[in-house]
Amino acid sequence: MSGRSHEPLFWSLFVVGSVLAAVIVPALILVTSVFGPFGWRWFADAFTHDGIRDLLQHSIVRLAIGAVIALIAVHACHRLRHLAIDLHAPLPAGLIGVLAYGSAAAVAVLTAIFLALV
Amino acid sequence: MSDTTIQLEVFRYRPDNGGPTFQSYEVPYHDDWVVLDALNYVKNYIDGSLSFRWSCRMGVCGSCGMQVNGEPALTCAAFVRDHMPGPIRVEPLVNFPVERDLVVDINGFMEKLDHVKPYLVRDDEADDLSAEYLQTPTQLDRYKQFSMCINCMLCYAACPVIGRVDEFIGPAALALAQRYNLDSRDQGKNMRQDVIFQNEGIWECTFVGECSEVCPKHVDPAGAIQQAKLEGAVDYYKRLLTPWARRS
Amino acid sequence: MNRPLDRRLGWTWWTRNGSYFRIFLREATSAFILAEVVLFMLLLHKAGQDAETYLAYRDFLWHPLMVVFHLVALAFALWHTISFFLIAPNALPGQVAGRRIPAAFIIGQQFAGLAAVTLLLFLWVAWVGAT
């Protein structure tokens, strides 16, 4: 046996990300990628170049989007990590962890940079 | 005696006689027979060499758990009529080492049970053995569901994590840990949490939930483990933020 | 000699029956959610560049084949939402302040929250698009 685990750190972020993913991702997909191409004008107009810049105008909005995207990325990567382990992926568990949380961190950092540059 | 019969395909394994095989037996069909009745018919009238565990025949002792058509079940509660017209395939519980025929080695499970101290732990136990510890119905209600476990081990056969990590404490033992941790009379929570908050405790669990599906007593070990995770996370941050606090 | 037989569930456990497979699908939702998050992240990236670059990416995102992918991803995202909401009552403590909370109430509250957030997001984006 190995002493108390540090998994709670990742698990708690995963749970928060799970809640956010559950309530936000369906709407996010619909709004950014389905309503527009289906020709719903208001949503198509919201994603012109000026439209998306209007959406991202307020720094509070950018801050919220950054936090939400980061947590959802942690949620997805944590789950993929455990799926890989449960499917007996032939890689060291430590490497799977580095890959998974490394990807989540990359998404979080890049999103923050991109939001700052809008 | 009815004329209808049903085919049993029974897993046979004798360590000295090569690999495992399936052996077919034709047994009489009765509307009110369970799979255990059919097995006992085989044992008594067809083939006395068949080995399997059973005792109470009424879903209390937890010793007759086997795979019935691939699913873990108490054979004393699995009606033959639900599997008509057959055949019914009976195997030992998966995830456990098979000793012989339908008999599995449960020593690993017994050790895991031991790890979580599934009994009331009191600091003052030595002082007064006649002491009474009162409990309100609300306090009883907090853990009652988790106390219904009969240690039948169906949940271990249903758990893919057990199949991967031998050391994983597993559903029933973790649910029992939670049962005593939630008991207002118990004082052993900290000791138990030292065990269940390790990786091989609750944190290997990925909430597949099949343990709760197969549980004949509706204990919901999966729920117990998730509730323990919530407590484990709160406890983790408490320790992180107040490292100076002394804990036993 | 005592040679116990090893009968552990291997890596193919999720193919054994329907409920295992549903759990596998639940875990696999994360791949689609991650993909959509990365696509959205790139949209934010392009929003910071000139209009031409942005529109080229947006047209790729709105290409009919990509829309098919988005609809599949949407189905998986909804499966995450539904499976998460349905198991939440089991994962929460049975009592709050000595009282049992009915599972149906917890599940209902979550779907109400989903409806509220979705509606707010729709209204906000539509309002920005319409003005």
Image (cartoon, coloured by chain):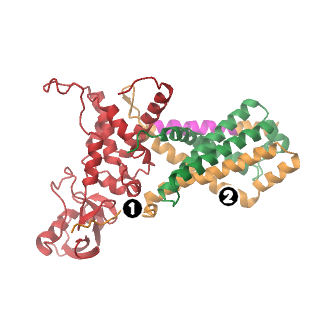
Chain colours: A green, B red, C orange
- Residue A53, percent across and down? 81, 38
Position of residue A26 measured from the top left corner of the image (x, y, whole percent): 63, 46
- Give the amino acid type for the residue marked by disc 2 in the picture: Phe
N-terminal label among 2 and 1: 1
Residue B33 seen: no
Magenta stretch: residue C114 in it? yes
Question: Number of callouts in the render?
Answer: 2
Quadrant for the C terminus of chain C, please.
top right
Along the viewing direction, whichever of C44 and A109 lies nearer the viewer: A109
Q: Is residue C36 magenta?
A: no
In which image quadrant can residue B35 be found? bottom left
Quarter holding residue C44: top right
Q: Residue at x 28, y 36 (%)?
A: B144
Residue receiving disc 2 = C69
Q: Name the magenta segment's main secondary structure.
A: helix
Question: Over which residues does the magenta segment extend?
Answer: C105-121
Disc number lying in front (2 or 1): 1
Disc 1 designates what residue? C9
Position of B56 with respect to B213 (left or right) is left
Q: CA distance from mark 2 to mark 1?
A: 33 Å
Where B163 falls versus A11 (above or below)? below
Q: Is residue B154 above or below residue C85?
A: below
Q: Chain of mark 2?
A: C
Element carrying mark 1: loop
Point out residue B11 in the picture as x, y percentages from the top left corner: 27, 70
